[in-house]
Image (cartoon, grey):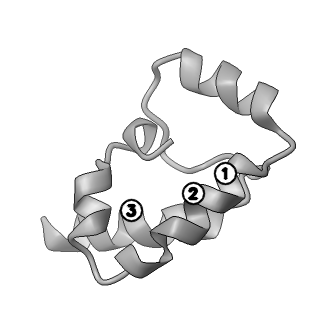
Amino acid sequence: MVNRLGMSVDEIIKSDIAYHLPTAQRLCGQCEKIGECDMLLGSHQTLRHAPSFCPNAAYLRMAKHRAAADH
């Protein structure tokens, strides 16, 4: 999902929100919408926002905002 939002995990690791990444990974692994997510990720399209069903939507929105501010 990070890549589909035009970011890289490296960008997040270097940011001040990196300490939340393990929680985000855990939430992703426990998500009940894996089928919907797999379909979305399989499309290879760049997304403006994480889908509303994503348990990490708020975190990814914050990460994208921080990445944009750093550029």
Q: Which mark is residue 25?
A: 2
Q: Residues within 10 Å of mark 3 (few under 14, many from 20)?
A: many
Q: Amino acid at mark 2?
A: Gln
Q: Secondary structure at mark 3?
A: helix
- Which residue, as the protein is rendered here, is positioned at the far top? 43
Contact? badges 2 and 3 (CB < 8 Å): no
Q: Image point 31% across, 73% down: which residue?
A: 66
Q: Nearer the viewer, residue 7 or 47?
A: 7
Q: Are marks 2 and 1 in contact (CB under 8 Å)?
A: yes
At label 3, the amino acid type is Lys
| In the image, residue 48 above or below residue 67 | above
Q: Residue at x 40, y 67 (%)?
A: 63
Which residue has dot 3 on it?
A: 64
Q: Where does the image place residue 12, in percent across and percent down from the top left?
A: 31, 64
Tell me where residue 13 sits by quadrant: bottom left
> In the visual, does 63 lie left or right of 28?
left
Residue 56 visible in the shown view: no
* Up-down relation of residue 36 to residue 15 (above or below): above
Q: On residue 28, which mark appears?
A: 1
- Amino acid type, label 1: Cys
x%, y% of residue 25?
57, 57
Q: Is residue 5 visible?
A: yes
Q: Earlier in the sequence, mark 2 or mark 3?
A: 2
Give the class, few, some or many, for how many residues have Cα within 10 Å of label 2's Cα (few <14, many ≥20): few
Q: Is residue 7 left or right of residue 49?
A: left
Question: Which mark is nearer the camera, 2 or 3?
Answer: 2
